[in-house]
């Protein structure tokens, strides 16, 4: 008995996104899905780079589990280095990154690699499981017991990723082995599906549609009907026997999303993520030419150049006095190019200096407000000639009312992205502590006091009732460990 995969892959841009930042790959031995992050910072390039780094493993005939896991780890490290080099070459891509979920197959062995909040699920004998763990703030709160899974599913910050494959940090993926069985069905998807379609519906759909192609089309349709706020990508793979079937294994390799030139709409070659990645990589290896004037001019034969100069009509000048001829003949031909050169140089210096200054501001972040929401901004909280030097980088979903003005004033000073993220986390913790401590105060105020019974005396019926009421009173509300110590309640 030899195990193989029968799979289908689909990706859709969704209803609200302009382009597709997801990338995916499906082959006989490899399934990969990546959800690019960063938007303006080239999220689609990051996801395409990740898929391109891992896709060659499909054809390497790896069998040993340690060898498979090592190959995945090396591919992820290679993708991380590529993203880092791209950011050095073009600072505007700072902050780009991608989630990544990959399954490398060899017979019944599966080597898994996961980082971020894309997901992998397994349907086995009718039971449905999530087999990856989200690297998100909400999931960490669930792990700590501070949030229920039901609350996490609708939490406004459920997409705040704590670990990803990024240009600014070393990748730290989860790596592990699984054992596949005949009849298993696997689903890999971006959060454009899992955020808007419940696990119960995913489970029902995988059971109801035996054909993977029909199943992925149905899942895409469900996400679209749920609003389609994000790119939607999913892979469904069935584990089949190459001899007994019931269907033949898939053999073709399939690319989708940004790795396959985005959302399927025609694009110029120069606009494809692959070309952008190539240009950024080339920029890292060679000096960047910003104007064709920096190139060596093509020299024409002297005769042709002279003929062209002689054929050019002379400009008409006003004759003010006889000395005009001397100025035009002697000084004009030399002074005007000098003045032009100085003006051009000044423009370059001012414009170039302004651009450099603007680029420096874009490496800074601060926490401010937009409407009634706390937002992380990229840049500095200043404007020059009516031009804002900052833009919204990430909406946190935290109401401004949650900010304790006695402890923090917004906007904050500009600093690193990590500092801004810590500030947001402190705001969230401060609010959580305020709510938790208020609950403890209320609990303490309403807690029944058990009467003191003298030793050897039997309590009255009223005293017994009061004792039982104090004993049965609801437990004291928990206070998160990060809250400051309080007096005993």
Image (cartoon, rainbow, N blue to C red):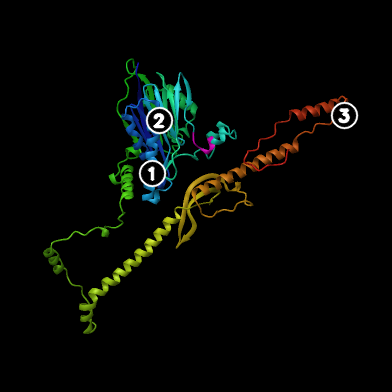
Pointers 1 and 2 in contact (C-beta within 8 Å): no
Q: Give residue 312's position: percent from left, percent from top.
A: 16, 68
Pointers 3 and 2 in contact (C-beta within 8 Å): no
Rendering quarter of residue 437: top right
| Residue 138 lies in the magenta stretch | yes
Tag 1's secondary structure? Answer: helix
Q: Is residue 376 above or below residue 49?
A: below
Name the front one of labels 1 and 2.
2
Residue drawn 72% across and 41% down? Answer: 487
Mark 3 or mark 2: which comes first in sequence? 2
> How many numbered marks does the figure carry?
3
Q: Is residue 321 above or below residue 171?
A: below
Tag 2's secondary structure? Answer: helix
**Crowd band around label 3 with a 10 angstrom C-alpha radius: few (<14), some (14–19), many (20+):** few
Mark 1 or mark 3: which comes first in sequence? 1
Q: In the image, which residues are magenta?
A: 134-139
* Cα–Cα span, label 1 and label 2: 21 Å
Q: Most extreme residue toward the left, as rendered?
A: 303
Residue drawn 45% across and 43% down? Answer: 169
Circle 1 residue: 83
Circle 2 residue: 69
* Cα–Cα span, label 3 and label 2: 70 Å
* Cα–Cα span, label 1 and label 3: 75 Å
Pointers 1 and 3 in contact (C-beta within 8 Å): no
Q: Which mark is residue 454?
A: 3
Rendering quarter of residue 456: top right
287 vs 120, left or right, is: left
Mark 1 or mark 2: which comes first in sequence? 2
Q: Give residue 221's position: percent from left, percent from top.
A: 41, 31
Tag 3's secondary structure? Answer: loop
Residue drawn 70% across and 31% down? Answer: 475
């Amino acid at each position: 008995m030899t195990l193989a995969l029968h799979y289908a892959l689909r990706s859709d841009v969704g209803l609200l996104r302009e382009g597709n930042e997801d990338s995916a790959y499906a082959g006989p031995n490899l399934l990969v899905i990546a959800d690019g992050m960063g938007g303006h910072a080239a999220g689609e390039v990051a996801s395409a780079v990740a898929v391109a780094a891992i896709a060659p493993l499909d054809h390497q005939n790896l069998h040993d589990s340690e060898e498979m896991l090592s190959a995945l780890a090396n591919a992820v490290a290679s993708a991380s280095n590529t993203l880092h080099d791209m950011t050095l070459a073009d600072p505007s891509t700072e902050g780009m990154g991608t989630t990544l979920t990959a399954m490398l197959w060899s017979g019944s062995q599966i080597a898994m690699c996961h980082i971020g909040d894309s997901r992998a699920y397994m349907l086995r004998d009718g039971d449905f499981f999530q087999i990856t763990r989200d690297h998100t703030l909400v999931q960490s709160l669930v792990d700590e017991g501070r949030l229920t899974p039901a609350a996490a599913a609708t939490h406004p910050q459920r997409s705040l990723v704590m670990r990803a494959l990024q240009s600014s940090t070393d990748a730290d993926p989860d790596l592990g082995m699984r054992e596949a069985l005949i009849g298993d069905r696997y689903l890999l998807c971006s959060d454009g599906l899992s955020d808007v379609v419940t696990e119960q519906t995913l489970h029902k759909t995988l059971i109801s549609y035996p054909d993977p192609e029909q199943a992925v089309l149905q899942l895409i349709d469900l996400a679209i009907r749920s609003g389609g706020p994000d790119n939607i990508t999913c892979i469904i793979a069935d584990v089949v026997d190459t001899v007994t079937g019931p269907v033949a294994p898939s053999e073709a390799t399939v690319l989708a999303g940004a790795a396959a030139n985005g959302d399927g709409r025609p694009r110029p070659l120069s606009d494809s993520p692959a070309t952008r990645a190539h240009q950024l990589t080339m920029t890292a290896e060679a000096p960047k030419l910003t104007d064709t004037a920096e190139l060596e001019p093509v020299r024409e034969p002297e005769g042709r150049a002279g003929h062209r100069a002689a054929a050019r009509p002379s400009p008409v000048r006003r004759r003010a006095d006889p000395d005009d001829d001397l100025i035009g003949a002697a000084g004009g031909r030399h002074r005007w190019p000098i003045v032009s050169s100085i003006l051009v140089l000044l423009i370059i210096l001012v414009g170039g200096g302004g651009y450099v200054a603007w680029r420096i501001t874009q490496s800074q972040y601060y926490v401010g407000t937009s409407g009634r929401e706390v937002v992380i901004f990229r840049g500095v909280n200043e404007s020059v000639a009516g031009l804002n030097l900052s833009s919204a980088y990430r909406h946190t979903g935290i109401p401004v009312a949650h900010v304790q003005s006695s402890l923090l004033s917004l906007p904050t000073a500009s600093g690193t992205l990590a500092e801004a993220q810590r500030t947001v986390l402190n705001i969230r913790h401060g609010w959580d502590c305020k709510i938790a401590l208020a609950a403890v105060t209320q609990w303490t105020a309403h807690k029944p006091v058990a009467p003191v019974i003298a030793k050897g005396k039997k309590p009255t019926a009223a005293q017994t009732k009061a004792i039982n009421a104090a004993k049965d009173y609801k437990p004291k509300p928990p206070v998160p460990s990060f809250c400051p110590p309080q007096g005993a309640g």
